[in-house]
Structures are given as structure tokens and as C-alpha cells.
Image (tube, rainbow, N blue to C red):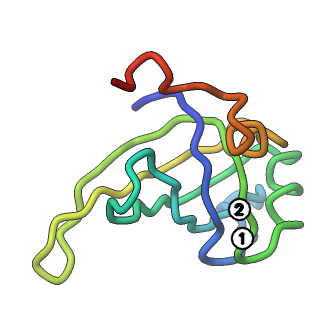
Amino acid sequence: MIDGIIIGKLTRPPKRLFTVRGSVYVIAKMNVHTYRVGSPPIYANIIAFDSRVCAYLLERKQGETLSLGGIITPKLTAEYGQTEIELDLTVKTIMTGYHIGQAAGKGRLFEHWLA
């Protein structure tokens, strides 16, 4: 498990579900933006338990871009004979505006590694 931030577009609208004890949680799927241009997409399974995060996610629509912070668990899946990377993200916080700063070049996350 890794603490991190992912940025991507919702590929399925968030869905409200209930635990056995009646607590609300939200699930969604997103297509994660990757650093390498032309690389295959990475899909993320999103789950949130915090009431404020759940409320925010439920207001979002399919196709919206989000920046989410939390616990990331990468895994390999083999579908249709091809191995793919997939992420499971337990959302702890919403990073509003983070992806806008990254797109405007203010993030500079990879500046030191570019040759």
C-alpha cells in the first residue's frame, strides 16, 4: 500500500452503497492519467468511507476530472490474455484544483528526472 495522489476521469458515476451496519460508502471507477504519453490506461477502483468525501464524490458526474488522495494498492490483472496494472484507492481526501495546477505546469513533479 502506498499513500499518494491520483488524477483521472471518472469512467463510471459514483454509486452510494451501505455496509451491513448501515454506514454509507461510495464506489466509482476512474481512468488514471499517466506520466508517459501513449502508455496504456491505468484503471482505478475507488472507494470512500468519509462522509464529506462521499458527499463530494456523489456530486460528480461521469467524465469529470478528479484529484484524489489516499491509500493506493497496485495490482496486476490478467483479462483477455493480457496483463494490466490496476489500482485500488481508498480515498482519504479530495485535492480540489490540484490537477489544474499540474496542467498549468505548476506541479513540476518530474522536473528533476527529465533528461
Vertical comparison of 100 with 15: above or below: above
Q: Position of residue 47 (x, y in %)?
A: 61, 55
Q: Which mark is residue 26?
A: 2
> Could you say whether the residue bearing mark 1 is in a helix, strand or loop?
strand
* Neighbours of disc 1 within 10 Å: few (<14), some (14-19), many (20+): many
Decide which of 19, 38 is in the foreground and name it.
38
Vertical comparison of 41 with 62: above or below: above
Decide which of 65, 47 is in the foreground and name it.
65
Q: Position of residue 10 (x, y in %)?
A: 65, 69
Q: Which mark is residue 14?
A: 1
In-image side of 47 versus 31 (left or right): right
Q: Which mark is residue 73?
A: none
> Could you say whether the residue bearing mark 2 is in a helix, strand or loop?
strand
Q: Amino acid at mark 2?
A: Val
Q: How many marks?
A: 2
The quarter of the image holding the C terminus is top left
Return the residue found at the far top. 112
In-image side of 4 versus 104 (left or right): left
Return the residue found at the far bottom. 80
